[in-house]
Amino acid sequence: MLFVTLSISNLQRKSLMLSVSDNPQKLIILDRDGVINKDSADYIKSVDEWLPINGSINAIVKLKQAGFKVAIATNQSGVGRGYYSESILSAMHKKLADLLAVFNVAVDYVAYCPHLPDANCACRKPRPGLLSEISEALSVDLCGAIMVGDSLRDLQAGITLGCQPVLVLTGKGQATLKQLKNNDIKSDIAASDIDVFDDLSEFVNHYLNINSV
């Protein structure tokens, strides 16, 4: 399966490009580590190590209360490496679910890839398999949906299926922004601007605000 490589000709922070009218299915797809929870170079291997980034739970709550579908697409090669089991991964996601349940909301779908990078699977980002799984599970067209990530892989996977890419500067976001600004990647597509935000909370507050006027 082919996937696009990403080039950014112009990076803007807090642009007014994003709008609900371009996202009629009202779907927001989130990467997990570095977007919702704190990331680690040593992997997130246990429920205790799964710690939400400040403001991320409230951000998801706001999206759900505003009528959006929220899905997660996450590479979890730690399973394939033997660092943790799929049952522990499920327990991490239950921790997230429990935090959201306090506010009577839930994530609509979680798609994850457990494979190693050299497995050549169709699901590991930047390939779009996880996003295709979300599309099928929720019966929605992903064109115009929002893909929020902290890495090039996230943005590439989203753009491949027509999503609007949003970069957050948590997790690997700062390094990703530097790579984009230095034009360290070649272009296979004509990419428009990438919206860049400090974190998920800032993105959600901005996105909901510009679409309420």
Image (cartoon, grey):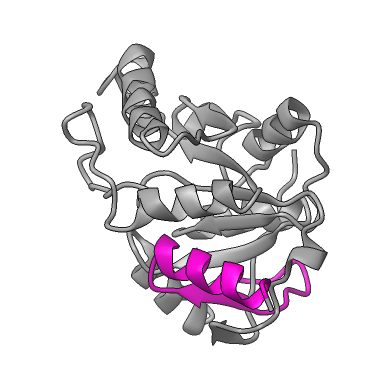
Residue at the image point whose x is 55% and y is 52% from the top: 63
Within the image, what quadrant is residue 4 found in?
bottom right
Q: Is 59 part of what is drawn in magenta?
A: no
In the rendered picture of this protein, how many numbered marks are placed on residues? 0
Between 191 and 34, the residue placed more toward the observer is 34
Whether residue 199 appears in magenta in the rendering, the answer is yes
Q: Which residue is more in the foreground, 37 or 60?
A: 60
Q: Look at the picture and state if 118 lies above or below 173.
A: above
Image quadrant where residue 59 sits: bottom left
Q: What x and y, as percent, mark residue 192?
A: 72, 78
Q: Nearer the viewer, residue 63 or 87?
A: 63
Q: Position of residue 158 (x, y in %)?
A: 66, 53
Residue 68 visible at all = yes
Which image quarter is the N terminus in? top right
Q: Is residue 23 left or right of residue 111?
A: right
Span shown in magenta: 186-212
Residue 188 location (% of width, % of height): 74, 66
Residue 35 in sight here = no
> In the rendered view, does 72 fall on the left or right side of 53?
right
Q: Residue at x 75, y 35 (%)?
A: 135
In the picture provided, is 49 more to the left or to the right than 129? left
| Horizontal and vertical percent position of residue 144 | 78, 58
Residue under the point 69% across and 79% down: 213
